[in-house]
Image: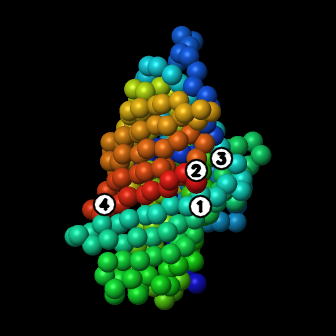
Amino acid sequence: MTIVYRRPAVVAVAAGLLLGAAASACSDQDEPRGATVDPTPTELADLPLDTVGYVLDVETLGVGPRAMIREPVPVGRVETARLVICDTGQQVRVELVAEVVEAAADGSSQTVRLTIDGAEADDPEVERGLIDAVGASAEIVRDGAGAVVGERIDLPDELGLRARTVGELALRAPFFALGPWPDNELSAGARWRTVFGLVGVDRSDPDRTVEADLVTLTPNGRASDYELRLAGSPDAVITGTTGRLLPSRQIMTIDGLDVRVESPPAG
């Protein structure tokens, strides 16, 4: 088996990652809190993971009902998703299973395992090439704010170039638009900016900046539904529900490909 190590997809903000909190009234004392983080994951020290530092700057908390989105999803949570990749009118569809497999007791880190559970394509040749990708997996390490700080992708040797590209993209895309949530209760209209930079590797790679706008936040029982728009690398639209591991819907462009992730609630 070939182990492919990639620097993490460090370009976005979490959708459906964190345990929901009931919306609360605005507090005049609640000021936007930024953060500077230079994390080194320790819970899986045997994995040769790159680490990512970031600076989070909250510009505004928004107005209206609030929810605390920054809470870890518990170990054992399993959710499924379908990823659709569109290229020149052709589609590739990949079924994924995501599971939280490990977490630090203090909430400082968390590991999610993604597994390809099925794949199909409009092009029969592409579909045949994807057969060996089924069962491939990745381990994604996130910090306590939900930011991806490391990843490991395992792909079989026999994959062709096209299937390998699809496999890597499929195993990265659900968390490609992940990043730190502010340590605040947020309302619709909240805005924050995150600058990501790799730690301990070639600093010739430029830092990346992502600006996030919380477009809507709607209380839904104990959870809240939200829509998030990202401007940066990549641009993306994400809808989700607090307390879920995966976004309900995530639309973005990665390396010139239109990529959609859909994970409807169970039941």
Q: Which residue is labeled 1 in the image? A: 98
Q: Which residue is labeled 3 in the image? A: 73
Q: Amino acid at mark 3?
A: Val
Left/right of residue 2 with respect to residue 44 in the rendered view: left
Q: Which residue is labeled 2 in the image? A: 245
Disc 2 + disc 1, Cβ < 8 Å: yes
- In the displayed structure, would residue 27 be above or below residue 85? above
Q: Report helix, strand or loop for mark 4.
A: strand
Disc 4 + disc 3, Cβ < 8 Å: no
Picture disc at residue 74: none
| Separation of residues labelled 2 and 1 (CA atoms) | 8 Å
Q: Which residue is labeled 4 in the image? A: 258
| Separation of residues labelled 2 and 3 (CA atoms) | 6 Å
Q: Earlier in the sequence, mark 3 or mark 1?
A: 3
Q: Amino acid at mark 1?
A: Ala
Q: Earlier in the sequence, mark 4 or mark 2?
A: 2
Query: Quarter-wise, where is residue 194 in the image?
Result: top left
| Separation of residues labelled 4 and 3 (CA atoms) | 28 Å
| Separation of residues labelled 4 and 2 (CA atoms) | 22 Å
